[in-house]
Amino acid sequence: MRRKGNYNRGRQGRRRGPGIWTGNFLKMIAIAAMVMDHVAVVILEQGIIAVSQGDAAAINEFFASDIGVRILLADRILRGIGRISFPIISFLLTEGFLHSRNRRKYIIRLGSCALISEVFFDLAVYDSWFYLGYQNVLFTLFVALLVLTGMRRFNRRPVLQIVCIALGSGVSWLIHSDYYIIGIILPAVFYWFRNETLFQMAVGGILSIVESINYFGSAILAYIPIMMYNGKRGYWHLKYFFYAFFPLQFLVLYLIRQVLLRGGWLTGLITQAGL
């Protein structure tokens, strides 16, 4: 019997240090950072591309203007903050895997949400109902869960565990899922060093800096809340909230962009830039 609000800890789990933040609180931080990142991509970047009709010269000229520089700065700040999200989500994915009472259902649930979300992701980011060139981050997490399953299966055979990581990385690269290879290695690192917090944070931090190098390594900031994690889930069950929120946010952001386009707000920015 488990105490309400705590994970069901198995032999592979371990009690964290004297942190003050629950898994739910970390999840809300990750969601907030993720939304900021998607606002930059869907509304700012894709909005400007839509107004400029994909003309690379016009886009470059816009971002060279005074107002374009301010928009670009806002975009960089939002996307830099957004880098915080993935390390936290990867960490919570690993924690969820370690303490899940039904890992098969966990995998099926995440895979199903990835498929549903892809429609809204493609619409918001590529203005298309179907685009195979790039897949949303839930596909990366789905593959990562399969890798963790393999690593658990070969718990005492590190060579085969490395093979699982390599295969998962290859799949992520082939399907062009978000975060590519690092998106598979990072959860694997959290799992591999699950009993060694120092190594977990150090290796994970280096990977996160590399992934966010274009944003001055801002993803390293994710390890502040991760280190504050107290090993408890929290009172509220937020996993279904996340599964519903992830695809719906893309739909909402897409609709906001359409309103801004039809209302002339984004076109006005181009006009103000003198283009």
Image (cartoon, rainbow, N blue to C red):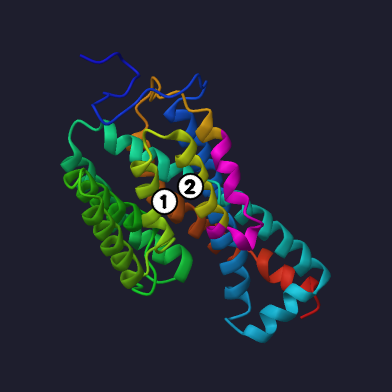
Range of the magenta residues? 210-224
Please tell me whether the stretch drawn in magenta is mainly helix, strand or loop.
helix
Nearest the viewer among 271 and 139 is 139
Residue 270 picture quarter: bottom right
For residue 204, which numbered disc appears in the image? Answer: 2
Q: Give the x, y percent position of residue 229.
A: 48, 28
State yes or no: discs 1 and 2 in contact (Cβ < 8 Å). yes
Q: Give the x, y percent position of residue 41.
A: 56, 62
Q: Please say whether residue 212 is one of the residues in the magenta stretch.
A: yes
Q: Residues within 10 Å of mark 1 (few under 14, many from 20)?
A: many
Residue at the image point whose x is 29% and y is 13% from the top = 3
State whether residue 88 is above or below residue 166: above
Residue 175 picture quarter: bottom left
Image quarter hosting the N terminus: top left
Residue 24 picture quarter: top left
**Which is nearer the N-term, disc 1 or disc 2?**
1
Q: Give the x, y percent position of residue 161.
A: 25, 53
Residue type indicated by callout 1: Leu
State whether residue 10 is above or below residue 89: above
Nearest the viewer among 70 and 8 is 8
On the image, numbered disc 1 is attached to which residue?
A: 186
